[in-house]
Image (cartoon, rainbow, N blue to C red):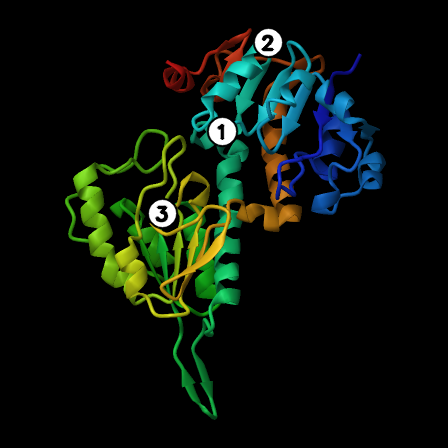
């Protein structure tokens, strides 16, 4: 009997993505899986039930989707949804295990083998499974577009019969995947772009996109850990960094912040002093709002105006682009499914570093060391 993969509708407020799009479902059904899609699961991302039926999916109820051998989701299962999961089944999707480790205990209690997309190791072989990078790129793009519609100025240099309009100054804080996409997008719109990152090694990438790299006179250490994430600066250096950034922020029309470390509060980069230094009508888009924000005045989930500056604290920018975000996320799930399933269903592989790096729960226990340490 073919194994089943369940795709439920996302119910968290504001979430419009769907875990698997029809293109991915078609590949899975051809490989022998039965894909059970909850009716209406893809509608908010503009994928209709008929689109799934055409590629061989089985439309079902919420209970049927959750009861599949392998459950795939965008948002972590809620405490109310976990009892619907198949006892001893498998889960692949976002879990936020470093931010909400207690949820992992509830999932483990179902006997579920759960793979967290946040914890996929950043190694070459796993690039096709790197959902965080795929969605961060969309977020960086969307952040700049959002800022451009709020800013009461043009982004590009314009020469008209009435005179010349100077280009807007855009500062991007953090030059990871989201930051680099934000830089590239702002440049395409014609803005004058600069960027800052605690990792000097990314200066060349920033400059290759046509932006200038901001260098602060701050003592530096190796600022990348083995997982590829920026390390948190020690307290004294962090304070120094915030103060040194004030003049650069002050002369910017738009600031996009992207500094986010999984499992930690977002580092402070923009003080109230820096916001006061910006001109009225300026815009800050804080992409780290979900973890508290990089700006001292960010209100997570809201857009506020402080000292004449609009501060956008949207938690989920990727949800504004559900078509392509769902496509990219679904392809990362497909890569995981292809590696850890065969004709009989889910196949755990304790010898595979992608499996061991992303596996949070197994055989009734929380097995990921970082997550376990947060539960002690």
Q: Nearer the viewer, residue 325 or 208?
A: 325
Q: Nearer the viewer, mark 2 or mark 3?
A: 3
Q: Position of residue 44 (x, y in %)?
A: 71, 45
Total numbered labels:
3
Q: Does residue 43 lie above or below 264 as drawn? A: below
* Disc 3 target residue: 294
Q: Look at the image and tell me whether residue 213 can be seen.
A: no
* Category of crowding for the residue at label 1, using alpha-carbon neighbours closer than 10 angstroms: few (below 14), some (14–19), many (at least 20): some
Relative horizontal placement of residue 266, taking residue 155 as reference (left or right): left
Residue pictured at 84% horizontal, 35% vertical: 53
Q: Are marks 1 and 2 in contact (CB under 8 Å)?
A: no
Q: Quadrant of residue 252?
A: bottom left
* Disc 1 target residue: 96
Q: Nearer the viewer, residue 351 or 182?
A: 182
Under tag 2, what secondary structure? loop
Q: Quadrant of residue 246?
A: bottom left
| Cα–Cα span, label 1 and label 3 | 19 Å
| Cα–Cα span, label 2 and label 3 | 38 Å
* Category of crowding for the residue at label 2, using alpha-carbon neighbours closer than 10 angstroms: few (below 14), some (14–19), many (at least 20): some
Where is the N terminus found, in terms of image quarters?
top right
């Amino acid at each position: 009997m073919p194994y089943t993969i369940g795709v439920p509708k996302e119910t968290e407020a504001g979430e419009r993505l769907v875990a698997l799009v029809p293109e991915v479902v078609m590949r899975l059904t051809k490989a022998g899986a039965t894909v059970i899609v909850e009716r209406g699961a893809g509608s908010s991302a503009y994928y209709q039930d008929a689109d799934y039926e055409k590629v061989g999916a089985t439309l079902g109820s919420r209970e049927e989707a959750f009861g599949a051998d392998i459950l795939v989701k965008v948002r972590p299962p809620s405490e109310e949804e976990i009892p619907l999961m198949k006892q001893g089944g498998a889960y692949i999707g976002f879990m936020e295990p470093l931010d909400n480790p207690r949820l992992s205990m509830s999932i483990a209690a179902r006997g579920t083998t759960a793979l967290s997309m946040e914890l996929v190791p950043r190694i070459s072989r796993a690039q096709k499974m790197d959902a965080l990078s795929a969605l961060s790129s969309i977020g960086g793009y969307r952040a700049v577009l959002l800022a451009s519609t709020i800013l009461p100025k043009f982004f590009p240099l314009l020469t008209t019969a009435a005179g010349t309009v100077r280009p807007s100054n855009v500062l991007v804080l953090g030059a990871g995947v989201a930051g680099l996409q934000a830089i590239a997008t702002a440049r395409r719109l014609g803005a004058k772009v600069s960027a800052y990152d605690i990792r000097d090694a990314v200066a060349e990438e920033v400059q290759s996109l046509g932006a200038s790299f901001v260098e602060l006179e701050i003592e530096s250490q190796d600022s990348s850990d083995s997982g590829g994430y920026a390390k948190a600066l020690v307290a004294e250096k962090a304070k120094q960094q915030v103060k040194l950034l004030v003049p650069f922020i002050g002369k910017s029309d738009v600031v996009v912040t992207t500094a986010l470390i999984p499992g930690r509060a977002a580092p402070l980069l923009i003080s109230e002093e820096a916001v006061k230094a910006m001109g009225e009508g300026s815009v800050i888009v804080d992409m780290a709002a979900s973890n508290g924000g990089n700006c001292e005045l960010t209100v997570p989930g809201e857009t506020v105006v402080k000292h004449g500056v609009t501060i956008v604290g949207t938690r989920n920018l990727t949800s504004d682009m559900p078509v392509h975000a769902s496509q990219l996320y679904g392809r990362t799930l497909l890569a995981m499914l292809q590696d850890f399933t065969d004709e009989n269903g889910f196949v755990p592989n304790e010898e595979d570093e992608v499996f061991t790096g992303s596996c949070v729960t197994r055989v009734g226990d929380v097995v990921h060391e970082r997550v376990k340490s947060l539960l002690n």
